[in-house]
Structures are given as C-alpha cells and as structure tokens.
Amino acid sequence: MSHRFLRSMGMLALVITTVLVAPVSAGQAPQTAAKAKGKTGAKAWTPPRTPDGRPDLQGVWNFSTLTPMERPSELAGKTFLTDEEALEYERREAERRSKPNPRTAAELARDPEFGAGAEAPLAYDFRIWWDRGSKVVGTRRTSLVVDPPDGRIPPLTAEGQKRMAAQAEARRRPAAGPEDRSVVDRCIVGINSGPPMTVSTYLNNMQLFQTPLYVVILTEMIHAARIIPTNGSPHENVRRWQGDSRGRWEGDTLVVDTINFYDTTSFRGSSPNLHLVERFTRVDADTLLYEYTVEDPMTWTRPWTVQHPMTKTEGPLYEYACHEGNHSMIGILSGARAEEKATEEAAKKKGSR
C-alpha cells in the first residue's frame, strides 16, 4: 500500500470527521439555477449555511433520471416535453424496462456511459440491478445536454475519431494483458463516478462533505473519494485517474476545476488534455443542481455542457467492491488465451484438409 494512498485516506478521515453540519443564515439561489429547476416566479429559497458562511451542500444525493444525455433524433428541435408527453415517456420506459434484458450485450458495448467491453452475451438479467430512476428531470428537458442548443454532443475531431477507432479495435481482439482492458473493466474507475458524474445503470449516488478548506465527493460506484481543496492552492503537475481537482466558490455555487487526467482515463473518448468544470448549486432543500462543461479540442469540435438535478436521499452509501484484488482479470485473460487457442486449432484443421 503506497504512502500516497495512506496520506489520502488519512486526509479523507480528517475531512469527514470535521464535517460541518450547522445550518442557517441567508443567501439567494442563483437565478440561473432557479430557471433550471423550473421555478421561475417562485419565492427565492434561502439555503442553509455552514459555520464558515458557505451554502451547505452536504448529504447523500441521487442523480438518476430517465432523461437521456442527448436529445433523441425523433425529438429534434423540441427542447421541452409537455406534462402529458413526459408522463407518456415515463410510462413507455417503465414498460420497456419490464421486459427481460431490454438492453443487449451489443448495446451495452456501444454505450460510452456503461463502459465498453460487454461483447459477450449477458450472464444475468440486468433488471435485478438497474436503478436509473423513473422520472424525467423537473424541467422536462429532452436532453441533459443543454449546450449546444440542439441537445447533442458535438462531433468528434479527426484525431478523436482515430483514437476511438483504435480503442474499438483493441477491444475486438483477445486481451494480451490487463492494460488491454478498460479502466472500468479493471475496476479502477466506476462507470458513472467520473468526473464528471453521469447517469448509468445503477449506483447513481454520491455523498458530499464540506470543511472550510476542503470538499469531498464520495461516489457509491467503486467508492471513489475526490478530496478537493478549496483553499486557493494551485493545481499539481501530476496526472491522476480522476484528474487533479481544485474548488472555489462563486457566490452560492461551488465550482470545481479539473485537469491532468491520467492517459488511460477516458470520458466518452476524451484525451488526457480534458478540461472539466463542474458547478454545484443547492436550489432547494432537496435539490442540488449539477452542471459540467467539457472542453477537449483534441476530441470534440467545441465545448459542451450538461445540466441535471440531484435529489436528496436517505443514506447510507454502501460499499461497491467490484472485483476485489482484480481477481476477475484472471478469468478475462484465461478466456482470451482460450479464444486464441481455439482460433489456432481451427486454422490447423482447415490447413490439414
């Protein structure tokens, strides 16, 4: 166990044990946040405060939603659903998901949010574990992407396309070693823990802690903890699995700036030069508005922004062990060797005819 890991765990313990829970005092939620929540015209809400005067964002928050990341092609040009359309969409989704394995292995393999690598037939009925929510976001927006205005992620650059094609090719061949599998397969990074945090099939929960000098974001998936300084310290020139994050306050909004991602960490095909800016604003007692902007000129033709609310929920978070000690990698690599052997034997038989 490395000294860096021990120091990180010690810092996490210190931060959590000094969590500030005292409420009170006034402050007005930003108007943009109120609009995103769909509460324009409503009486301004006063968020509780920590003893150092910051908005209290602490608690367990769930970010499940039926609203898709990108606007479906059949809804092109339609930014919002009506109340009736939202209810019908929720009904159809509930019906679709009640059927056995509504998503095939091929679909999962193509889904960047799930984590590529699901080429084999599904071993069990995923409905047992699914928890993607049952409602669309409160604004009834047709996509979580709010910029570009068409609700679609911008096109990949030529370099981004080349990188994605190389990754897809690597997944198609038997893995020579652990490095040929994604960091999701290896249980290093969760399928939705990010950053940024994204809606996935299950474990869409995070817990936020605050002290005057730090914020901690603990995700249920892979129980990953991001310890984020808010003391004005500069970024370190070190690459990390979840990047190097620094926080600051802009009024009542917590802004987290993250750079220096590790070269094998990828968000929807991003490069190590990904620049991520997350914004957290508590807009009412039970809603934390989460917004992030993705900028990576080596991958996308322009920056893009996602916005969706998180809902206060009862804890606790449960440990998600994934495969402890990476023991499943033995099975993955053994399967790859068996596949290679079968291919060689088939070639020998064909040559002997």
Image (tube, rainbow, N blue to C red):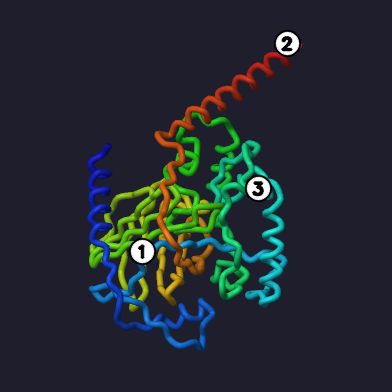
Q: Quadrant of residue 315?
A: bottom left
Q: Is residue 144 above or below residue 347?
A: below
Q: Quadrant of residue 213?
A: bottom left
Cβ atoms at labels 2 and 3 below 8 Å apart = no
Please state which of the two labelled residues, at mark 1 or mark 3, is closer to the viewer.
Answer: 3
Mark with earlier residue (1, 3): 3
Residue 16 in the image, given as x and y percentages of width and height: 27, 57
Q: Residue at x 58, y 22 (%)?
A: 338
Q: Which residue is mark 2?
A: 352
Q: Residue at x 57, y 75 (%)?
A: 139
How many numbered marks appear? 3
Residue 289 in the image, given as x and y percentages of width and height: 45, 71
How far is the residue under mark 1 from the one under mark 3? 32 Å
Q: Residue at x 27, y 55 (%)?
A: 236
- SS type, badge 1: strand
Q: Could you say which is closer to the camera, residue 87 or residue 229? A: 87
Cβ atoms at labels 1 and 3 below 8 Å apart = no
How far is the residue under mark 2 from the one under mark 3? 38 Å
- SS type, badge 2: helix
Q: Could you say which is closer to the camera, residue 129 or residue 76? A: 129
Residue 164 in the image, given as x and y percentages of width and height: 55, 48
Q: Is residue 72 left or right of residue 327?
A: right
Q: Residues within 10 Å of mark 2 (few under 14, many from 20)?
A: few
Q: Quadrant of residue 77?
A: bottom right
**Amino acid on which the number 1 mark rests in the picture:** Asp
Q: Which mark is residue 107?
A: 3
Q: Could you say which is closer to the camera, residue 276 or residue 187? A: 187
Mark with earlier residue (1, 2): 1
Residue sitting at the far top: 352
Q: Which residue is mark 1?
A: 257
